[in-house]
């Protein structure tokens, strides 16, 4: 037993978040307005894309993305099994069906060869959602190449991947639509929030329309117009997915230190590689990119089935030592609703299973001291007897 506490996640809020938030509180207008516009503009500039649409979650962004691409009832959408349930549920929102891909067990990412095999097997798959698991970019050039060959449209679920690079290019610049998450434990946060980015004007217009009730003009325009203008029309049954200024204010502050926070997580990852790298009972994340190109949203280890304790026992022992951890993910093929509805079989996803059976996500965030990271690593080594 110990008094030492290393939580799994902790949000860092700095002076600029407080300052921008205060500006919003003083403004007399708390929901979507100038701060959200500014956040969108700065985010688009950061990524280097034409359009950024702020929304109240990445799930909303993904929903707007499948809507904008015209995913229809009974269409097949390929997604990784090793992802958060949001990637699958937005497919169901459209009445479409998720088809699951296995992953590379080292990185947890889908690969071009897994993709090619599945698209060859099921010629009627029309869409693919790529997840940059843990914050490491999937091989987008190879994936897009194969998708194009089969006429498949691609969306990126980049909930883990801001800022994340591939060959020096930020995620957000590869496919037609990329969606980011600003949920509380993501790499930058607005409490709850998300962003959809695109270079396609038609997609942007559709997303903007559907983001707010299908009203054909922004509420912001309506309230800032000099004319007394109450009139609006509705051209589609849209959603209520706008991001309030209250949240955008926090995002603006976070965005300013996105790279500083990423670098701090990289330093934590370096400690884990250094002190856990020799442990024969663990598999550490396989790197396909340079450390500095990884967003380091997650640091996942896989505990060998040869270890004296199970993954769940390890998590319990770590709690006893004051260390919080998590598991990413119980794969989609194991979630009750999807397993029952689609009769998914565990044998069909052996590599996602291999990850799931042994995986533990370790604390990694801006503000986690390197001493605490070292304590986590040494405790794990002690518990595995290494
Ligand atoms: C967190 C997460 C989401 C959903 O993000 P929200 O902003 O909470 O809606 C989607 N996909 C993945 C892979 C995630 O990790």
Image (cartoon, helix red, strand yellow):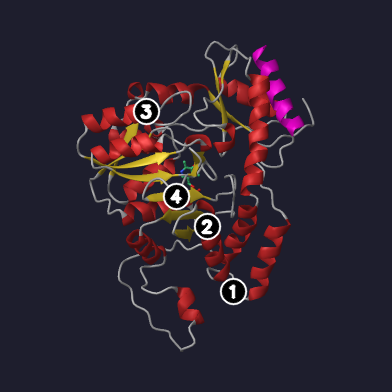
Left or right, 97 with reference to 231? left
Gap in angstroms between the C-alphas marked 3 and 4? 21 Å
Viewer-side label of 4, 1 = 4
Q: Position of residue 52 (x, y in %)?
A: 46, 58
Q: Position of residue 272 (x, y in %)?
A: 65, 26
The stretch in magenta equals 370-386
| Residue that badge 2 annotates | 45
Gap in angstroms between the C-alphas marked 2 and 1? 25 Å
Q: Residues within 10 Å of mark 3 (few under 14, many from 20)?
A: many
Gap in angstroms between the C-alphas marked 4 and 1? 27 Å
The disc, 2 or 4, on the residue closer to the chain's N-terminal end is 2
| Residue that badge 3 annotates | 102
The disc, 2 or 3, on the residue closer to the chain's N-terminal end is 2
Q: Quadrant of residue 323?
A: top right
Q: Residue at x 67, y 69 (%)?
A: 23
The disc, 1 or 3, on the residue closer to the chain's N-terminal end is 1
């Amino acid at each position: 037993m110990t008094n030492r506490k290393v939580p799994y996640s902790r949000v860092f809020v700095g002076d600029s978040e407080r300052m921008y938030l205060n500006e919003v509180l003083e403004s007399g207008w708390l929901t979507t307005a100038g701060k959200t516009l500014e956040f969108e503009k700065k985010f688009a500039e950061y990524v280097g894309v034409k359009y950024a649409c702020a929304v109240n979650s990445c799930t909303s962004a993904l929903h707007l993305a499948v809507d904008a691409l015209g995913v229809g009832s009974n269409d097949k959408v390929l997604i990784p099994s090793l992802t958060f349930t949001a990637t699958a549920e937005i497919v169901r929102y459209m009445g479409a069906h998720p088809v699951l891909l296995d992953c590379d067990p080292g990185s947890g990412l889908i690969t071009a060869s897994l993709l090619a095999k599945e698209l060859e097997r099921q010629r009627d798959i029309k869409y693919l959602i790529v997840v940059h698991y843990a914050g490491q970019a999937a091989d987008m050039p190879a994936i897009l190449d194969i998708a194009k060959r089969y006429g498949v449209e691609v969306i990126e679920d980049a909930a883990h991947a801001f800022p994340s690079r591939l060959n020096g290019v930020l995620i957000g610049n590869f496919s037609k639509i990329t969606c980011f998450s600003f949920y509380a434990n993501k790499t930058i946060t607005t409490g709850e929030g998300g962003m959809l980015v695109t270079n396609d004007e038609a997609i942007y217009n559709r997303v903007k329309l559907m983001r707010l009730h299908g009203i054909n003009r922004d509420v912001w325009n309506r309230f800032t117009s000099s004319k007394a203008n109450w009139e609006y029309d509705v051209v589609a049954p849209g959603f209520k997915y706008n991001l309030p200024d209250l949240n955008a204010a926090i995002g603006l502050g976070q965005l300013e230190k996105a790279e500083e926070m990423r670098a701090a997580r990289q330093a934590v990852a370096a400690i884990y590689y250094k002190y856990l790298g020799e442990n024969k009972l663990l598999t550490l994340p396989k790197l396909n990119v340079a450390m500095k190109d990884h967003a380091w949203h997650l640091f996942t280890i896989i505990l060998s089935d040869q270890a004296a304790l199970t993954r769940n026992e390890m998590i319990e022992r770590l709690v006893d030592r004051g260390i919080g951890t998590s598991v990413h993910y119980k794969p989609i093929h194991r979630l009750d609703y999807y397993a029952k509805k689609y009769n998914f079989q565990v044998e069909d996803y052996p590599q996602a299973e291999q990850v799931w059976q042994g995986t533990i996500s370790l604390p990694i965030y801006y503000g986690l001291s390197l001493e605490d990271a070292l304590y986590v690593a040494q405790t794990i080594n002690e518990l595995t007897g290494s």
